[in-house]
Amino acid sequence: MALHRYFIWSDVMRLLMDQIGERQGWKVESTSQAGIRLFHFMSYWYAGLYVVIEGWRELGLHDDVIDELLESPHVKLLRRYRNGAFHYQRKYFDDRFMDFMKPGAPAWIRSVRHEFSRWFLAYTNQNKGKGKR
């Protein structure tokens, strides 16, 4: 399934972000090399995960837990974040980035990622040997 590719691409960015965060004890200065790399990987993860949400909707896929998570106002903010990441912004701390940095957003995006992972694993296990990809 092509959508899985986008999930994997975004999840690699999450893994790289988590490696830096864990190595630094999640205490990094935004201007340090580690802080800049952390922001880089986080931005690409966030933007990539929005592409998965976009594909999910375009394909008309459904899952009760995922669909409920996607009713959150965080989805609109994540779309804006993706736009900020992939379309030049003059302002370094553009509102497209900062608006998503609200309480609850990090836990929400990790929940979305977890539920997509669960769904893709179940889908893959259900369709083993059926020639579907």
Image (spheres, rainbow, N blue to C red):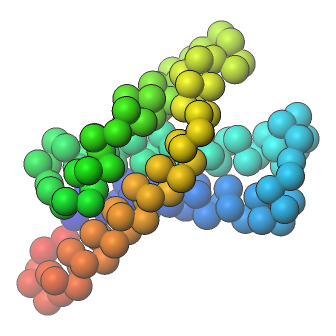
Q: Position of residue 82 (x, y in %)?
A: 47, 32
Residue 13 relative to residue 69: left or right: right
With respect to residue 95, does 127 lie above or below? below
Q: Position of residue 75 (x, y in %)?
A: 37, 36
Residue 122 relative to residue 85: left or right: left
Q: Position of residue 72 (x, y in %)?
A: 34, 39
> In the image, what residue occupies the spot 23% across and 85% down?
125
Q: Quadrant of residue 124?
A: bottom left
Q: In what quadrant of the picture does the C terminus appear? A: bottom left
With respect to residue 39, does 84 lie above or below? above
Residue 71 in view (yes/no): yes
Q: Nearer the viewer, residue 2 or 74?
A: 74
> In the image, what residue occupies the spot 50% across and 29% down?
81
With respect to residue 40, does 16 lie above or below? below
Q: Quadrant of residue 100?
A: top right
Residue 17 relative to residue 12: left or right: right
